[in-house]
Amino acid sequence: MNGGIRTRLGVTVLALACSGPAAEGPPEIRYGLDACERCRMSIDDPRFAAAVRTGAGEVLRYDDIGDLLAHRQGAGMEGVEVWLHDYADRSWIRAREAVLVRSELTTPMGSGLVAFAERATAERLVTERGGQLLEWSALAGGLEAPEHDDHRTP
């Protein structure tokens, strides 16, 4: 009996170790190695990188926010989680929480789109370099799945 418990425990530990990280949250991008889903160019600069995690857990990586938007128009990616990098500090932010700026900044594919977690930082870029403030919802048109309401009753 003791051996059976140890065997089951060993199988459980092995299964957990092989399962990998949960398929949620910002994905990993291996800069200089991973290729953009749309243009196939190497993703080299996190300031412009974006990613999509589909409902099935598939990760799509992009070198430019503009590539993500162009690719999704032809791909029908509804109900997904979209992540952008904050241009200022390179941290991941949920696209629906981001403030975007379209400006004359040089981005990998020329979209001029960059994202910020803080509106004040985005406004400062517009003041310093020109451009236009944009909300993700206006650009993406329903690309992301709606947030789940954990308080609703079945």
Image (cartoon, grey):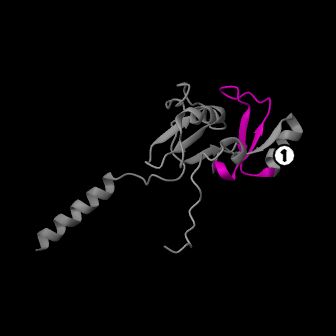
| Rendered position, 18 above or below 103 | below
Q: Nearer the viewer, residue 42 or 76?
A: 76
User: Outermost residue toward the right?
Assistant: 127
Counting from the top left corner in percent of width and height, residue 73 is at 59, 34
The residue at 59%/30% (across/down) is 44
Residue 100 lies in what quarter of the image? top right
Give the magenta range: 94-119
Residue 38 within the segment the image draws in magenta: no
Q: Is residue 13 left or right of residue 141?
A: left
Q: Is residue 3 left or right of residue 65?
A: left
Could you tell me the amino acid type at mark 1? Glu
Residue 97 within the segment the image draws in magenta: yes
Q: Which residue is mark 1?
A: 123
Q: Nearer the viewer, residue 95 or 7?
A: 95
Say which quadrant the N terminus sits in.
bottom left
- Describe the element under mark 1 as helix, strand or loop: helix
Q: Nearer the viewer, residue 103 or 7?
A: 103
The residue at 56%/41% (across/down) is 51
Counting from the top left corner in percent of width and height, residue 110 is at 70, 26
Counting from the top left corner in percent of width and height, residue 18 is at 31, 52
